[in-house]
Amino acid sequence: MKQLIPLIIVLLLVAACSKESGNNTNRQKDILAEQEDSDAWRIAVLPTMDCVPLIIAKERGFFSSQGIHVRLCPFQAQLDIDTAIVGGSVDGAVTDLVRAAHLESSGVELSRVSSLESAWYLVALRSARIRKLVQLDDKMLAMTRYSVTDMLSDRVVDSAKLVSERVFRIQVNDVGVRLGMLTSGIMDAMFLPEPQATQAQLMKHPVLLSTNQLDLRMGVLVFRNQSLRHKDKDLKALLSAYDMAVDSMNDRGLQAYSDIIHQYLGISRAVIDTLAKNFKYSHSARPREKDLQYVDEWWKSRLESMKNVEKRYLQ
């Protein structure tokens, strides 16, 4: 028995050392994971087609191949993304030029890094038998304030010479909820991005207007200036990885990534197949000057009208 005691002590010491070594290894892994996460680009995304290149770049390792770490932060509503940008919990986001202007008016300094392959469609409820913009009189229109859909709502009212107060703009921020209100017959019309617009069209809901028809490119990838200044990150590498994803999708087709798109966007293969027929992505590029100017003019007019309303209330 006395001979066994030293052996037992040795075995206990070996086990303790192994455990300590394992704990050290785990701590090192945790430290590396924390470091990687702190160095990562935190980008807010929605379940929309303009986010797909970022998703593919992440899933296929294009970001990693460029030596950068990216963490995609999924949201369902643009309003929640705005909160994340203002609070600094994300570095950048997929948004639109109007919302970027609104965020800047709230004191957030942003850089418009790249235009995105975004489009918005004005879709009408099939059973409402709305075929022309003028028929939106006395109808409910789902949209989001201070966004491209807000700007487009004004465009619709003006072009159809409607009375603004008789087009009832209902704020519905979640694109999934908005589509559900159409399919259940709750809303007369709404603005939808892709792929929700194609999903609605496959259910025979008609499209009255789109940003493509108006030659407007409103989607944009933005980053907080504070994030760009205070983090050692390579924006050029990020955009290079984005372009690699674009080339891969354009070469192979959307169907080659249908599993990933279905996983992130929650859409059916039928919608993906329909989009794949004519959906092409473009390389990263700065927003067009004409689009920036269009938004700037609308935003100034909106601010002026808001001031006039305040004056009337104060009188």
Image: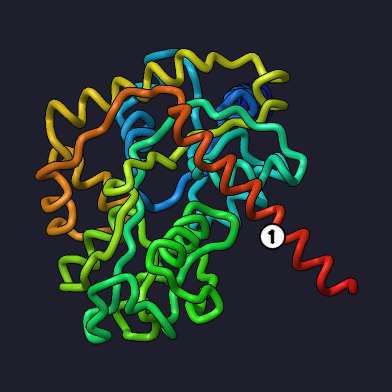
x 51%, y 26%: residue: 113
The C terminus is located in which quarter? bottom right
Q: Is residue 9 left or right of residue 63?
A: right
Q: How is the image coloured?
A: rainbow
Count of numbered labels shown in the rendering: 1
x 45%, y 32%: residue: 290
Q: Is residue 271 left or right of residue 108?
A: left
One can see residue 266 in this view: no
What percent of the width, then of the height, locates residue 301?
63, 51
x 45%, y 67%: residue: 157
Quarter assignment of residue 66 = top left
The N terminus is located in which quarter? top right
What percent of the width, then of the height, locates residue 55?
36, 37
Residue closer to the observer: 108 or 300 = 300
Q: Is residue 121 above or below residue 103?
A: below
x 22%, y 80%: residue: 126
One can see residue 261 in this view: yes
Residue type pointed to by label 1: Ser
What percent of the width, then of the height, locates residue 246?
27, 27
Sort mark 1 into few (<14), some (14-19) or many (20+) by Cα contacts within 10 Å: few
Residue closer to the observer: 221 or 153 = 153
Quarter assignment of residue 8 = top right
Instruction: Identify residue for label 1.
Output: 305
**Given the current orientation, which residue lies at the most extreme right position?**
315
What percent of the width, then of the height, locates residue 203?
17, 72
Q: Is residue 16 left or right of residue 158?
A: right
Q: Is residue 113 above or below residue 172?
A: above
**Given the current orientation, which residue lies at the most extreme front position?**
161
Q: Secondary structure at mark 1?
A: helix
